Image (cartoon, helix red, strand yellow):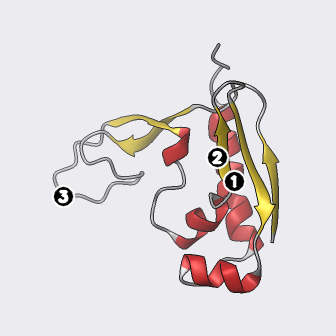
């Protein structure tokens, strides 16, 4: 599986409303005492859900702090995919998460 995603400069840095402010869980939070309030998370945390598809989608993630550009570029074999994620993650699953990441970055104005 090959990855070749590069964001526009300053496009994706913080992703609004996807993290539980009380527990730090990626939305939706399933804690009984959750108050439902959301907070911004850093883009680097977007793929840190512990789910196999996020692990593979974020496997090559890199952030150029100077240019404010996210990239997910690289290639992973089927064997390495399964070994790293604990199960095989197909291209559609990984692409879906990368598209959600890119869309979250587009949903707000660019920051300078």
**Measured from the top left, where is residue 16 in percent x and y?**
50, 33
37 with respect to 74 (left or right): left
The span from disc 1 to disc 2 (Cα, nearest Å) is: 5 Å
Mark 3 and mark 1 in contact? Answer it, CB < 8 Å: no
For label 3, the SS is loop
User: Residue at (35%, 52%) from the top-left corner?
Assistant: 25
Q: Is residue 84 above or below residue 17?
A: below
Determine which quarter of the picture holds residue 7.
top right
**Mark 2, mark 3: which one is toward the viewer?**
2
| Among numbered discs 3 and 1, the one appearing first in the sequence | 3
Mark 1 and mark 2 in contact? Answer it, CB < 8 Å: yes
Per the image, the residue denoted by label 1 is 98
Q: In this view, does 38 lie above or below 100?
A: above
Q: Is residue 84 above or below residue 55?
A: below
Where, quadrant-wise, is the C terminus in this rendering? top right
**Measured from the top left, where is residue 76 in percent x and y?**
75, 72
For label 1, the SS is helix
User: Residue at (57%, 65%) from the top-left corner?
Assistant: 55
* Front residue of this view, candidates 92 and 66: 66
């Amino acid at each position: 599986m090959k990855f070749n995603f590069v964001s526009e400069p300053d496009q994706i840095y913080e992703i609004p409303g996807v993290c539980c402010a009380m527990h730090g869980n990626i939305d939706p939070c399933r804690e009984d005492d959750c108050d439902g309030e959301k907070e911004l998370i850093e883009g680097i945390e977007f793929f840190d859900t512990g789910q196999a598809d996020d692990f593979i989608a974020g496997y090559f993630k890199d952030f150029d702090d100077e240019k404010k550009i996210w990239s997910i570029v690289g290639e992973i074999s089927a064997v390495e995919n399964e070994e790293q994620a604990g199960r095989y993650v197909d291209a559609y699953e990984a692409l879906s998460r990368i598209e959600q990441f890119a869309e979250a970055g587009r949903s707000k104005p660019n920051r300078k």
